Amino acid sequence: MATLVTHCVGSTMARVIIADDHPLFRAALKQALTETLAAPILEAESFEQLLTLIDSHPHVELVLLDLTMPGNRGLTGLTSLRSRYPDILVVVVSANEQLDTIRQAMAFGASAYIPKSMPLLELQAAIHTVLAGDTWLPADIEQAVTQTAAEDYEEFAKRLEQLTPQQFRVLECLADGLLNKQIAYELNVQETTIKQHVSAILKKLNVTNRTQAGILFKQMLSTSDTNH
C-alpha cells in the first residue's frame, strides 16, 4: 500500500493539496508553490488519499488534481470533489491538452486547467489568479475555449426552446441542486412525474446526466448576465 505523503510545519494550517502520482512532478509543483504560498503543502498520490487528506484538514482551500492518478478516471474525480466539497477550488494539472477535455473540465467546475508542459512561473501566476477568485486558462487555450463555449451555449439555448414550461421549471430546480422528491414537493406533483420530466430534459438537451444539465444551464445564465 502506498504511503500517505504529507508536509506540515508546526500548527500551521495547510491550504493546498497536490494530488498526483508522479513524485518528481509533485516535488516540482511543491517547490513552485512554496515560493508563493506561506503555508504548508500536502501531497496525495491517489484519489483515495486525497479524500482522506481533505477530510482530516478542514482548512484546505485548493486542490491541484491530476486526471490520471490512481482512483481518478478522467473527470470523475473533479465532479466528485465539486459535489462533495463545493467550497474547495480545484485546479486540473494534466498532460492532456485536448480542447474537449479542457472545456469539459471548466464546465464541471474547475477553477483552472494547467497543462503539465507549462513553465512553473506561469503555474505560479495561475494559482495566484485562482486564489484571487478568478478562473484561469493559458491565453491560447482560453481563446479557443471561449469561442467553442459560445457556440455550445447558442446550441444549448436552441435546445432549451424544446422544453415545456413545466420541464423548464424542473431544470431550474435541477440547477439549484434539488432532488426529485424536493422538486415534486415544490411543483406539487408526483415524484414519478418528475422522473419522467428529467428523462425528457436530458434527451432534449442532449446531456448525459442531471448534473451536467444544471451546470450548463447555470453557466448559460451567468454568461447572459455578464453580457447585459
Image (cartoon, helix red, strand yellow):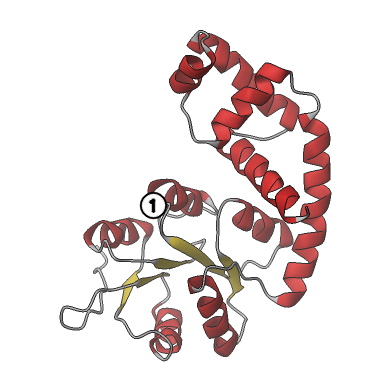
Q: Is residue 153 left or right of residue 178?
A: right
Q: Residue furthest front?
A: 228
Name the residue: 66% across, 61% down: 102
Q: Residue furthest left?
A: 10
Q: Residue 118: which quarter of the image? A: bottom right
Name the residue: 78% across, 55% down: 227
Front-lying residue, 156 or 102 = 156
Q: Residue 51: which quarter of the image? A: bottom left
Vertical comparison of 5 with 226: above or below: below
How many numbered tags mark residues here? Answer: 1
How far across and down, in percent of the image, does residue 173 sit?
55, 29
Name the residue: 43% across, 52% down: 86
Vertical comparison of 214 with 13: above or below: above
Q: Residue 121: which quarter of the image? A: bottom right
Front-lying residue, 29 or 160 = 160
How far across and down, in percent of the image, does residue 83 sit?
44, 46
Front-lying residue, 188 or 143 = 188
Front-lying residue, 33 or 227 = 227
How far across and down, in percent of the image, does residue 138 sit?
68, 75
Vertical comparison of 156 with 96: above or below: above
User: Tag 1's secondary structure?
Assistant: loop
How far across and down, in percent of the image, does residue 37 sit?
39, 84
Quadrant containing the N terminus is: bottom left
Q: Which residue is mark 1?
A: 85
Which amino acid lies under the numbered mark 1 shown in the image of this protein?
Tyr
Local crowd at mark 1 within 10 Å, few (<14), some, or many (≥20)? some
Name the residue: 50% across, 15% down: 184
